């Protein structure tokens, strides 16, 4: 095995491990966005419009593209995740996002898992009832 391949695999495993820690530390990141974030951070595959706007630090576009059920605490959780668990070179501006994406393999494409409720955009196909509900076990929707 080529030592560079082994290094690359370890680097990808570390990125994924750190992201998984972030999902545990930031439980208000909606579940329907997690796959899109993982595909982007670990595999360097372009996200949908909403996550793309968040990663580019384009607040107006992110709000315009957000799922109607997304709450302010969800936005805060996404930002906390980016600030604390996602490498700075992969988000924060359009230039950073495009540079990050250049590092991916040309043959990688993103297809949602059938029946996963996940679209290629990382946004729900038919609405996600979990969006807008705090994971505090009360099951009540926050207004």
Image: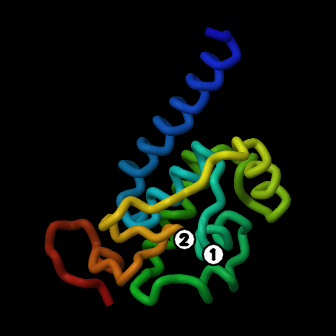
- Residue name at image x 56 percent, y 48 percent: 84
Residue 58: where, in percent of width, then height?
Answer: 72, 75
Residue 12: where, in percent of width, then height?
Answer: 57, 32
Residue 65: where, in percent of width, then height?
Answer: 59, 84
Q: Residue furthest left?
A: 138
Split into 4 quadrants, where in the image is the N terminus?
top right
Residue 63 in the figure: left or right of residue 117:
right
Q: Earlier in the sequence, mark 1 or mark 2?
A: 1
Note whether 94 is above or below 40 in the view shown.
below
Foreground: 78 or 103?
A: 103
Residue 93 in the figure: left or right of residue 75:
right
Q: Residues within 10 Å of mark 1 (few under 14, many from 20)?
A: some
To which quarter of the image does residue 96 belong?
bottom right
- Residue name at image x 38 percent, y 59 percent: 113
Note whether 80 is above or below 143 in the view shown.
above
Checking the image for residue 139, the label placed there is none
Q: Residues within 10 Å of mark 2 (few under 14, many from 20)?
A: many
Asked if labels 2 and 1 touch by Cβ distance under 8 angstroms, the answer is yes
Q: Whole-Å distance between the Cαs marked 1 and 2?
A: 6 Å
Checking the image for residue 49, the label placed there is 1
To which quarter of the image does residue 92 belong?
bottom right
- What is the count of numbered marks? 2
Q: Residue furthest right?
A: 95
What SS does tag 1 mark?
A: helix
Split into 4 quadrants, where in the image is the C terminus?
bottom left
To which quarter of the image does residue 132 belong?
bottom left
Please name the residue that numbered disc 2 is placed on.
121
Note whether 33 is above or below 45 in the view shown.
below
Foreground: 124 or 131?
A: 124
Foreground: 77 or 123?
A: 123
What SS does tag 2 mark?
A: loop
């Amino acid at each position: 095995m080529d030592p560079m391949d082994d290094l690359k695999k370890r680097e990808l495993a570390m990125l994924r491990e750190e992201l998984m820690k972030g999902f545990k530390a930031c439980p208000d990141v909606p579940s329907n966005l997690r796959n899109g974030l993982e595909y982007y951070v670990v595999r360097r595959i372009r996200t949908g419009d909403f996550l793309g706007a968040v990663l580019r630090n384009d607040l107006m576009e992110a709000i315009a593209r957000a799922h109607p059920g997304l709450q302010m605490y969800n936005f805060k959780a996404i930002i906390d995740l980016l600030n604390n668990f996602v490498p700075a070179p992969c988000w924060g501006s359009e230039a950073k996002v495009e540079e990050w994406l250049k590092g991916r393999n040309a043959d990688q494409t993103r297809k949602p898992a059938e029946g996963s409720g996940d679209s290629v955009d990382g946004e729900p196909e038919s609405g996600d009832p979990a969006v807008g509900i705090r994971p505090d076990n009360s099951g009540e929707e926050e207004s």
